[in-house]
Image: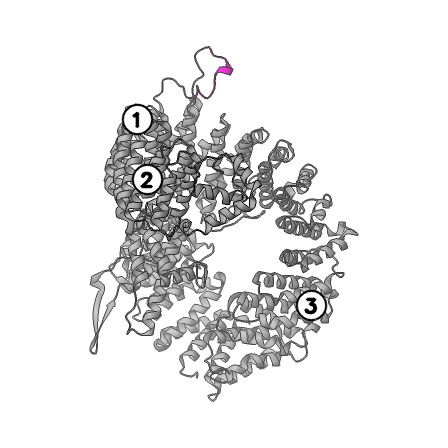
Amino acid sequence: MCPHGGAITPKHRPLQIYFYLNPPSVKFSAGSLSGVTSLCPLQTRHVVGAADSCPSTKMSNVSYHISNLLEKMTSTDKDFRFMATNDLMLELQKDSIKLDEDSERKVVTMLLKLLEDKNGEVQNLAVKCLAPLVRKVKEPQVETMVDTLCSNMVSDKEQLRDISSMGLKTVIAELPLSSAGLSLTVSVCKKITSQLIGAMGKQDDVSVQLEALDILSDMLGRLSGALVSFHSSLLSSLLPQLTSPRMAVRKRSILALGHLVPCCSPALFSQLTEHLLTELAKGPPTSMTRTCPKEMSPHVATVTQLCLKFMTYDPNYNYDDEDQQEDDSMDVEDVLDEVLMTSHLLKLSTSSIKYRPSPPTAPESDDEYSDDDDMSWKVRRSSIKCLEALILTRRDLLLSFYSSICPALLARFKEREENVRADVFTAFSTLLRQTRVGSSHHGNVKAGSDPALGSEDEPAVAMLGTQVEKDVPVIVKTLHRQLKEKSIWSRQGCFCLLTELSHTVPGALEQHIPALIPGLVFSLTDKSTSSTMRIDALSFFHVLLLSHPPEAFQPHMQVLLPPVVACVEDPFYKITSEALLVAQQLVRVMRPQGHSATAAGLKATDIDQEVKERAISCMGHMVCHLGDHLGVELQGVLAIFLERLKNEITRLTAVRTISLISASPLKINLSSILPETLSVLGSFLRKNQRALKLCTLACLTALVTHHAASIKPAALEPVLSELPALVDEGDMHVSQVSITLLTCMAKWCPSSLAKISSSVLPGVFRLVHSPLLQGAALAAILDFLQALVLSKTSNLGYSQLLKSLTDPFQRSQSSDGTTIHRQSYQSVARCVAALSSSCAKETPATVAGLMQEVKNPGSPESARVLALLCLGELGRSGSLGRSKEVKTAASCALGSMAVGSLDQYLPFLLTEISAQPRRQYLLLHSLKEVISACPASGLSAHVESIWALLFANCECQEEGTRNLVAECLGKLTLVSAAQLLPRLQQLLRAGSPLARSTVVTAIKFTIVDHPAPVDSVLKECIGDFLKTLQDEDINVRRVALVMFNSAAHNKPSLIRGLLATVLPHLYKETQIRKDLIREVEMGPFKHTVDDGLDVRKAAFECMYTLLDSCLEGLNILQFLDHMLTFLMLARLASLCPAAVLQRLDRLIEPLKATCTTKVKAGSVKQEFEKQEELRRSAMRAVAALLAVPEVERSPSMADFANQIRSNADMASIYQSVQGGEGGGLGPAESMDIS
């Protein structure tokens, strides 16, 4: 700003600075200055240049420069004061500037004086200067600033009071949180606190009270941890303000208390609670509690009684008798004590929701009666907020909420106040969302899926499913009216609620779609509807289409389609994008009408990227479902798809779209674009983008499968040339999809594979021999080999393939000198069996050759092991050496062959197990193969004989044999759970420690990851087996923890109801027991052995699993007291950040100790590697903590974060775990829960 009121432009700046640095004796006006510049430009520039080059103007001495600025601040001209203050602020913001003691005192004095300046702009600049000044001056000067500001804050001058309050807030915001500056922070806060307490006592001036409470809230919000010694006095000062007659004072007091409570001591918390209870006893409550923290548990009963008392204490209002009767029916009976207390609180809230005033008794007109007369809506709204908070924080009570909160919310859908009604919809949506969040199956459930599926794992979902027929008509009936109202809030709340309902219980609205369509169309077509409203309506429509069958919409297409097409053509890209998603789903149900709008979006190049991609996808669905109706337009659309395929930005969407069209049952003719498409897709296979590779392979598979007749062998050569690089153990999924493509080529285009024996096939065989091959990738190779041998391709017959598979096993080591892995034997054996099953004529000769290989003592051991496994695999689908591998292979082969002829081989196998104690372990392996592979119907006749044998061996001294017996018992129990589980219970009570450990391990094998008939029976008795967590034998406790972990991981519904009794015993096993630690002498050395280590590991694995499957049943604060692993801490930081923050101070020291510990210089390499990995693990936990909002408000955490940033070594580790190698907590970063 120009000193005399005009704007400072680059033209005026040099001259203005000259006059500012050397004020003339004669004062010029702005006009005369501009006149001088215009009349004498050269002379003016000369003067300015001289001033700039003068050594005295450079002011190298900081003190002199500051003194000069301070002198300008005393000028009578407000513009000079403004510019001098601004320059001082710029100087103070420089890191290089250092002030001496005299300069500090002068600057502080001047700035405090400028706070009383008559010019508001100068005052504001002076306040801004305080922020950098706090970091520059020493403690006495900061205290001087605080004393002056506090004194000014209670001044009679309103402007000075306001600016001083701003200054105090600025100072508080700049006080250091690190330990280095903690003494300054504590000292300053002490002064501020004493002054604020005095200011709050000024009952005659409410504005002073409000300013003091605002400042106190800011200080507690940022520095509560540093004010521990002042918490008591602060609480004593704030409590009286809660009864102030001024609402603004009460609100600010509540805010300040809210900042104080998280860091106060339990004693102060109890004092606050007792005070609140005492005040509640004096009169009716005016607001509802927002949350119900664990610390409130001892007081919940008292609060509930008071609230129940005040629910009916109001002589000015009446309650609807019918509503009261409904409320009485919501009592929750026969529940745990805490649930009972919470239900009383719910009863209070649900009754308050119905709290409505009687009509005014005075003869007033409707126009005179307003919300100023009726405050009851505030009570109802706060009650709903309370209910929503309970739903969000107490997922362990979700089932009871459906019988208590759910009916109350449904009854309040008719709420007359718009904002309260919106909160009702939000609370009900939260209830549905919490139900869905608890599900172990994330994501949307597609239309046609069974809502009852997985109901045993999710009781809340099952309960909602049982109530939906009763509740949905009520919901739709109420919302049907709301959807046609002008109120934007109400309609948005309706759509959000209906969206959550469709997500949570797919298909629930099928019978009510005709009732919802008018409101939906109204929101899409009403000219007064906002863009946000249309987007919400389209989003709901999309979810509705996804979660309901197409038949439900077909009668209404004439009504639904026009507004959707209009939205596709909307100029706002977000509406267009959402509308395209809806149109994409409408393709499933509509006939050829309305694709022109999408075609226009497909052709456009100047539209938003999101709209462009969704236009491609939507048009692809139209071609897929309606291609036979497009006629001459089809070729133009396909040409556009090819053009989009060549575009780097849209190619991924185009690949997916072509895949969809290729698999269309309409057999769309793609011959016009097929050759060029194959060439472009082949080039995509060498790109580094993994998602593009996978989509391209899927697209090629669809093209080869459905359009093989139009593909010439030469067209596939660019694709085949890229496949060898993709068939590699480095990425098994890409390899699997690549081999699936080869399988389709072998089936539909066998002539194209003539040259693969020298290109792709060697890579396939390398993959077969890889130790990493298993699962879906192995299944894909089996399909490929079967298709290849049936294709009759030259040089790829049965004998050549068999030789390529088995050749590496004719020597004890592979060609590169490494030992062949055990998994390779299994993979090759399955490949041999797959080849033989496709060429039945070759099977006898193959079996004879394998038998000869086994009997030939000169054959390598690897060849004999493979031959035995191949025989077993062949037997499954239709004397030996002393090597352990050979014996294990033989036992698996025997079991596999017994599966094919159970009556012939099983009696022999059982006899051998009893008669051959030295071979018992291997023969039990065979029996395990039989039990695992045989269907229950085939095995039921032999259950008793197998059980008797296993029962006789359950107390074997050899642990490996006991584990095999346990696995056999568990899998056998799956055949007849009702008959065999009681026998296991009996053995648990009567058996020895060895028998108990066998029984508990057997139960682990009955818990499978899919629904099974045993689940219902096991749920009734699993509590008896979990009692072994208290067993006196440490091995029994260990296997009990392993079994509990398996249940929590695979079937959490089995143990959710038992957590209250099981968790104390689980936490007990996390403690180090000195009586289990012993010393073992190893020559001259002593080695410490901890017999409880395995038990503690098992306990921590259980705790980690519970975080994923049973979070709602855990007391997180109690959980944190026993949590000692970095992995769990990082997980909890994302799941329950509020609870972690409450325990943050006690967590920092272990993290800091681990991150700063260094290994002794003379240690071995393994010690360095171990410590480095430990530091990385701790740093991952630190990274997770720093991602929690407001975490650095903790002084200890802020100090630790600064230490990490300043230490190059720790900063490097932090950066690597945050975004580099090994960073984050992805799927690969998980605790072993096997």
Q: Are marks 1 and 2 in contact (CB under 8 Å)?
A: no
> What is the x, y in percent for residue 592?
73, 45
Classify residue 569 as left or right of residue 116.
right
Q: In the image shown, does 877 or 790 lie closer to the viewer?
A: 790
Which element type, helix, strand or loop, lies under badge 3? Answer: helix
> What is the x, y in percent for residue 130?
36, 41
Tell me the residue at 43%/30% (across/down). Answer: 381
- Label 1 Cα neighbours within 10 Å, binned few <14 / some 14-19 / many ≥20: few
- From the image, tell me which residue sits under label 1: 243
Report the amino acid beneath label 3: Trp
Q: Residue furthest bottom?
A: 858
User: If you read the primary sequence from the N terminus, does the residue marked by circle 3 or circle 1 appear first?
Assistant: 1
Q: CA distance from mark 2 to mark 3?
A: 74 Å
- Label 2 Cα neighbours within 10 Å, binned few <14 / some 14-19 / many ≥20: many
Magenta segment: 363-374
Number of callouts in the render? 3
